[in-house]
């Protein structure tokens, strides 16, 4: 009786292991179509991080644009040739 119960438990265990493996394969197929995003553990946090990086880059870009506007309006620079400005930039 005990041996029969052990065999039944082993069969149930093997069946459960196969079911888990099949579920894993199904999940891999379903997530595979999304590429690396499908493997991202927390896509919401990853997206929020990307938004923060974009906001930082936009802020930096706005600063650079303001600096360019200031420099292009500087009368001391307006009279210099483009070659002179290029040479100044590399020193």
Image (cartoon, rainbow, N blue to C red):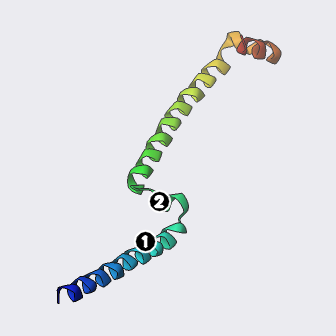
Residue 2: x %, y % from top left: 17, 85
91 horizontally vs 41: left or right: right
48 horizontally vs 64: left or right: left
Q: Circle 1: is it few (<14), some (14-19), or many (20+) Cα within 10 Å?
A: few
SS of the residue under disc 2: helix
Q: Circle 2: is it few (<14), some (14-19), or many (20+) Cα within 10 Å?
A: few
Q: Nearer the viewer, mark 1 or mark 2?
A: 1
Label pair 1/2, CB-CB below 8 angstroms:
no
Q: 27 and 68: which one is in front? A: 27
Q: Residue at x 30, y 78 (%)?
A: 13
Q: Residue at x 62, y 24 (%)?
A: 69
Q: Residue at x 69, y 9 (%)?
A: 76
Vertical side of 85 occupied by 37: above or below = below
Q: 78 and 2: which one is in front? A: 2
Quarter of the image with the N terminus is bottom left
The label number, if any, that marks residue 39 in the structure image: 2
Q: Residue furthest left?
A: 1
Q: 42 and 67: which one is in front? A: 42
Q: 69 and 40: which one is in front? A: 40
Q: In the rendered image, which residue does mark 1 sit on?
A: 24
Residue 51: x %, y % from top left: 45, 46
Q: Residue at x 53, y 65 (%)?
A: 34
CA gap between label 1 and label 2 equals 13 Å
Vertical side of 87 occupied by 17: above or below = below
């Amino acid at each position: 009786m005990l041996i029969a119960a052990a065999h039944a438990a082993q069969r149930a265990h093997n069946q459960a292991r196969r079911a888990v493996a099949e579920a894993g394969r199904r999940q891999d197929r379903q997530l595979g179509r999304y590429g690396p995003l499908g493997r991202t553990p927390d896509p919401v946090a990853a997206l929020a991080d990307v938004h923060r990086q974009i906001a930082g880059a936009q802020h930096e870009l706005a600063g650079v644009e303001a600096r360019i506007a200031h420099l292009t309006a500087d009368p001391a620079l307006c009279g210099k040739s483009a070659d002179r400005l290029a040479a100044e930039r590399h020193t």
